[in-house]
């Protein structure tokens, strides 16, 4: 997966996981990550699909506007 695709997904998950109070244990962190992944909306999945398609079509070339 290309960096901009990872950044898009990680940015959302990070914003959902690292909110106060921060996870106090690894199991709590895992629960927050799973919960964040489960809350990804259809619009976000469409955006991810688009980014993956762009990466595939350009064969992973750097794309400024993304």
Image (cartoon, helix red, strand yellow):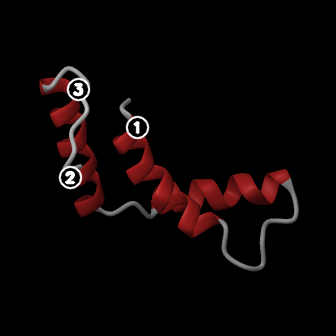
Q: Around disc 1, counting alpha carbons within 10 Å, would you say few (fewer than 14), some (14 to 19), or many (20 or more)? A: few
Left or right for 10, reference 5: right
SS category of the residue bearing label 2: helix
Q: Around disc 2, counting alpha carbons within 10 Å, would you say few (fewer than 14), some (14 to 19), or many (20 or more)? A: few
Number of the label disc, if any, that sits on residue 57: none
> In the orientation shown, which residue stands out farthest toward the top?
59
Note whether 60 is above or below 35 in the view shown.
Answer: above
Note whether 52 is above or below 40 in the view shown.
Answer: above
For this rendering, which residue is in front, 36 or 47?
Answer: 47
> In the orientation shown, which residue stands out farthest toward the front?
64
Alpha carbon distance from label 1 to label 2: 17 Å
Q: Which residue is drawn at 23% across and 49% down?
A: 66
Where does the image place residue 59, in percent across and percent down from the top left? 20, 20
Q: Which residue is drawn at 29% across and 59% down?
A: 44
Q: To which quarter of the image does residue 57 belong?
A: top left
Q: To which quarter of the image does residue 21 belong?
A: bottom right
Residue bearing mark 1: 3
Residue bearing mark 3: 61
Left or right for 16, reference 42: right
Alpha carbon distance from label 3 to label 2: 21 Å
Marks 3,2: beta carbons within 8 A:
no
Number of the label disc, if any, that sits on residue 46: 2
Alpha carbon distance from label 3 to label 1: 11 Å
């Amino acid at each position: 997966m290309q960096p901009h695709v990872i950044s898009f997904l990680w940015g959302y998950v990070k914003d959902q996981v690292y909110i106060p109070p921060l996870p106090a244990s690894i199991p709590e962190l895992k629960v927050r990550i799973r919960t964040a992944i489960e809350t990804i909306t259809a619009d976000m999945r469409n955006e991810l699909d688009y980014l993956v398609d762009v990466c595939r079509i350009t064969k992973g070339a750097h794309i400024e506007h993304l």
